[in-house]
Image: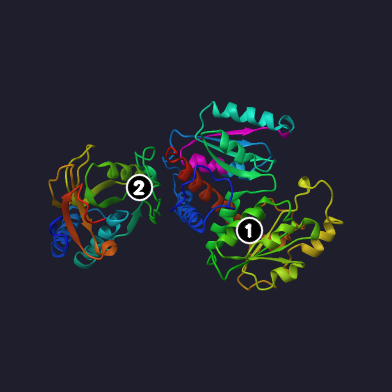
Amino acid sequence: MGFERKDLLGTRDLSAIEIRSLLESAESFKEIAERPLKKVPALRGKTVVNLFFEPSTRTRTSFEIAAKRLSADAVNMSVSTSSVVKGESLLDTVDNIQAMAPDIIVVRHKFVGAAHMIAGRVGARVVNAGDGANEHPTQALLDMLTISEHKRLGPGLTVAIIGDIAHSRVARSNIWALTTLGVTVRVCAPPTMLPRELEKIPGLVVCERPEEALAGVDVVMMLRIQLERQDRLLFPSIRDYARIFGLNRQRLDLAAADAIVMHPGPINRGVEITSEVADGSRAVILNQVSNGVALRMAVLFLLGGQSYE
Amino acid sequence: MLQTEENSVCSAQDVAQLLKRMAFEIVERNLVSEKLVLVGILTRGVSLARRLQKIIGETANRDLPLGVLDITLYRDDLSSATHHPVVRKTEIPFSLDGVTVILVDDVLYTGRTVRAALDSLIDFGRPQSIQLAVLVDRGCRELPIAADFVGVSVPASAQDRVMVRVEESDGFDRITVMPRDSTSGE
């Protein structure tokens, strides 16, 4: 019962019970952000190292705030990508950090499996904050925490994920977790941004056109076009992408009347989503950010509250 | 069914009587405190606080706000706990600045829960005073903490287990004492 792992590396192998127990815990942490004194002593004396090999502002800040609100000592290490190009130097970096005896390491790296490799090498608990295009479990969990504020998270719910599915660890973590809970997931992307293996996942529907993906859905999840992750342009022009796949008010009208709009951020306004929709009443994008702190507090607490046996 | 293993100290009727007396004492002691609030410690402390709230509302015509406190994040044994403690929702929808807080729990034993609750309450504001109300004081304190309102004192040794059962969680009201190594019950 509950979440009893050493590390949180992805959502792919999480059971429905583990996901629900993480979300339930996170619910209890939301209230701390509204207190006059936003700090509890739960992780006093624990050290959390944020080890980011890729640039990140919001995820790193979110983990840092979460750790500090739990009274842990949060240390940020941003390692420039250029200095770490070989697996060997990554291991050296990790060995050095382990020698400083942290309790939890939060890691982001451009290589798929980086967090898994580190987790197997260190005694500290490891949280994957993004490994290449593979997984970003805390983002998917905070997305589900946000959905659960508006919808019943389970069979009967339909979520459309639209955008660069192939390059998106956010999409992958969400697809694994949502389908585990029995949610129907529709994905839609230009063919060049759609990995083929997706069709085999039960509960997943691949749509060619965004209109098809949006029809009657309860939740619309737009993905950021990650130009920095593309080796070459995968669509003719940004204008074409915005015209065919961007979420505007007319397209949003195809979704259920009470559908919510999500985006993991940062937003490319006017590309994947218009400002009108992003700032509209159905957008829960800033709720996602607030929930991110509560969710990460729950994860850090469940991992770091006691030594792993 | 449990009479052989468990020694029932108080029946449901007794519990109702104890709560009534505690409610009177709380009102009597706080006749001049205008800002009086109840805060129950999860889980059974909250059920008892609700009942005190009801009795005080009916008999003294005073409508006291009620808060819910989870002390998990303030526990002093988090590093050594063998299982993952479940964090539940704290709900204190009013300011604690300048108010008199009646902190309610079911059993006062080592005093560690109350210590955690006091630290937590003080993080929410600066109450005028905090008074402690417990249904059972079973002794064996490990910290210098005492209750202001006690339903019943049950002198028990560390080998004994004192259980308060309340209808809201357990389906019935009863206070029992049994040997800790007893295999009956939970």
**Which residue is denoted by mark 1 in the rendering?**
A175
Residue A271, by quadrant, is bottom right
Residue A188, by quadrant, is bottom right
Q: Position of residue A82 (x, y in %)?
A: 74, 32
Q: Which residues are magenta?
A: A63-81
At x 43%, y 36%, the residue is A44
Type of amino acid under label 2: Ile
Question: Which mark is in front, 2 or 1?
Answer: 1
Relative to A179, B84 lies left or right: left
Q: Position of residue A307 (x, y in %)?
A: 43, 37
Residue A95, by quadrant, is top right
Q: Is A76 within the magenta?
A: yes
Packing grade of label 2 (10 A; few <14, some 14-19, many >=20) is: many
**Marks 2/1: CA–CA distance:** 35 Å
Task: Identify the residue at the far right of this view.
Answer: A236
At x 38%, y 40%, the residue is B78
Relative to B35, A227 lies left or right: right
**Which residue is denoted by mark 2 in the rendering?**
B71
Tell me how many marks there are: 2
At x 15%, y 59%, the residue is B18
The one of B18 and A22 positioned closer to us in this rendering: A22
At x 51%, y 50%, the residue is A294
Q: Secondary structure at mark 1?
A: helix
Packing grade of label 1 (10 A; few <14, some 14-19, many >=20) is: many
Regarding residue B123, the answer to whether it shows in the image is: no
Type of amino acid under label 1: Ile
Relative to B26, A34 lies left or right: right
Decide: is B16 above or below A228: below
